[in-house]
Amino acid sequence: MAKQSSDDLRILLLDEEHDRVSFNSGVESLDRYLKTQAGQDVRRKANAVFILSELSEPARILGYYTLCAMTISQGDVPEAARKHIPRYPLVSATLIGRLAVAKDRQKQRLGAILLADALQRAFESASTVGSSMVIVDAIDESAAGFYAAHGFVRLPDSLRLVLPMRLAGGTSER
């Protein structure tokens, strides 16, 4: 397969034109969410769902991620990240709730492209909605390693990782 140029890719909000039924990441819970729940979440504004596709095949979903607002207890923030956040009992954050790449397109850096876009959107909205960090709940150890390689700090004894918002704006994959 020819090397994918990021100029051939686009990331847009999920809409009715996207083929959710054919998406297969190899992770049943991520596939089921996109096929059965994502549309409702978008309509109800529970999550923003962003779709990665090629310009030449805009309906085909190559990957997706979700963003939503949340809070986390000050005590749950790792010491390494505390110096970058306000000292409130609850800290506002942006959650990357899900991130998945189509099975036949994995190992092509599409996950890094999706993550860079998610971080940029989180950073750009942080001054409007008030968010001091980005949080991910990794689905497994491999996913946790992916996020850690991109600067996220892992909470002890969990698959939750955090990144101070001021670091989210410095992404270079976009």
Image: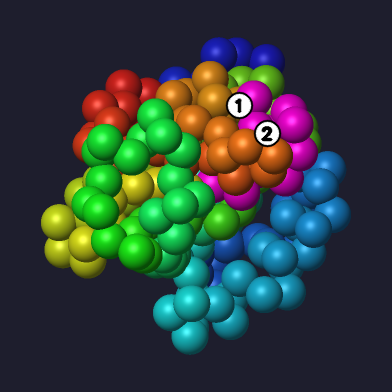
Query: Whole-percent x and y of residue 112?
Result: 50, 28
Please indicate, yes or no, whether residue 13 appears anywhere in the rendered image.
no
Cα gap from disc 2 to disc 1, whole angstroms: 5 Å
Pick the front one: 18 or 121 = 121
Q: Quadrant of the C terminus?
A: top left
69 left or right, relative to 155: left
The residue labelled by disc 2 is: 143
**Image marks 2 and 1: residues in contact by CB distance under 8 Å:** yes
Mark 1: which amino acid? Phe
155 left or right, relative to 75: right
**Count of all numbered marks drawn on residues in the image:** 2
116 left or right, relative to 21: left
Label 1 crowd (10 A; few <14 / some 14-19 / many >=20) = some
Q: Quadrant of the N terminus?
A: top right
Q: Quadrant of residue 167?
A: top left
Residue in view at x 34 percent, y 47 percent:
133
Q: Secondary structure at mark 1?
A: helix
Mark 2: which amino acid? Ala
Mark drawn on residue 120: none
Q: Residue furthest left?
A: 127
Q: Secondary structure at mark 2?
A: helix
129 left or right, relative to 109: left
Query: Whole-percent x and y of residue 147?
Result: 55, 31
Residue in view at x 67 percent, y 63 percent:
34
Query: Whole-percent x and y of residue 53?
Result: 52, 45
Q: Start and end of the magenta stretch? A: 136-145
> Is residue 142 part of the magenta span, yes or no?
yes
The residue labelled by disc 1 is: 146
Q: Residue furthest bottom?
A: 44
Residue in view at x 48 percent, y 70 percent:
47
